[in-house]
Image (tube, grey):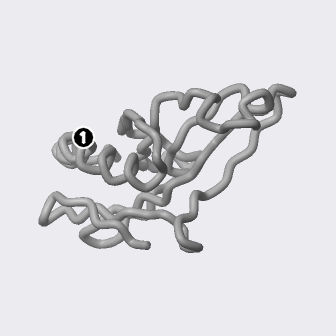
């Protein structure tokens, strides 16, 4: 079973719009990429991930963070006619441990919904 590549193409074309919204919300310039991945049950999912974030973005914590990126965490939450992207920060410590957390804005989890019919991203928080 493969994800419809027309759908992947459609989401790829919409990424500049999502990048602008996300950059405004997190205050950092990022470049997003989308690709198909398979879970341990060999079921395909769509993942959106950013290119690596410069550790200087993290201020005083930049000496602790070795690498970081923004991504979806596993399955994006495809639901009927929409795709839900919950913004997740994954990072590696200098000590080689990894961690991650959702990103919040105004006390609400930052997430966006992609509507297939309108081909638009809508902020959910």
- For residue 99, what is the image quadrant? top right
Q: Residue at x 34, y 47 (%)?
A: 1
The quadrant of the rendering that contains the C terminus is: bottom left
Q: Position of residue 90 (x, y in %)?
A: 63, 42
Farthest front residue in view = 60
Farthest left residue in view = 118
Q: Position of residue 15 (x, y in %)?
A: 27, 43
Q: Nearer the viewer, residue 124 or 1?
A: 124
Q: Residue at x 33, y 65 (%)?
A: 113
Q: Position of residue 6 (x, y in %)?
A: 16, 44
Q: Is residue 16 above or below residue 113?
A: above
Q: As drawn, is 63 to the left or to the right of 47? A: right
Q: Nearer the viewer, residue 40 or 81?
A: 81
> What kind of element bears circle 1?
helix
Q: Is residue 54 above or below residue 72?
A: above
Q: As drawn, is 52 to the left or to the right of 58? A: left
Q: Residue at x 23, y 65 (%)?
A: 115
- For residue 103, what is the image quadrant? bottom right
Q: Residue at x 34, y 62 (%)?
A: 83
Q: As drawn, is 68 to the left or to the right of 25? A: right
Farthest right residue in view = 95
Q: Position of residue 33 (x, y in %)?
A: 37, 35
Badge 1 density bin: few <14, some 14–19, many ≥20, Cα 10 Å: some
Q: Nearer the viewer, residue 77 or 14?
A: 14
Residue at the spot of label 1: 12
């Amino acid at each position: 079973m493969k994800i419809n590549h027309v759908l992947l193409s459609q989401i790829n074309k919409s990424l500049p719009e999502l990048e602008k919204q996300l950059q405004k919300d997190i205050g950092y310039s990022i470049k997003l990429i989308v690709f198909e991945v398979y879970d341990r049950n060999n079921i395909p999912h769509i993942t959106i991930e950013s290119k690596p974030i410069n550790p200087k973005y993290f201020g005083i914590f930049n000496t602790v963070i070795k690498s970081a990126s923004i991504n979806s965490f596993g399955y994006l939450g495809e639901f009927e006619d929409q795709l839900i992207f919950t913004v997740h920060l994954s990072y590696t410590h200098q000590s080689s441990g990894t961690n991650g957390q959702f990103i919040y804005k105004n006390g609400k989890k930052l997430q966006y919904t992609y509507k297939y019919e309108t081909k638009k991203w809508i902020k959910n928080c």
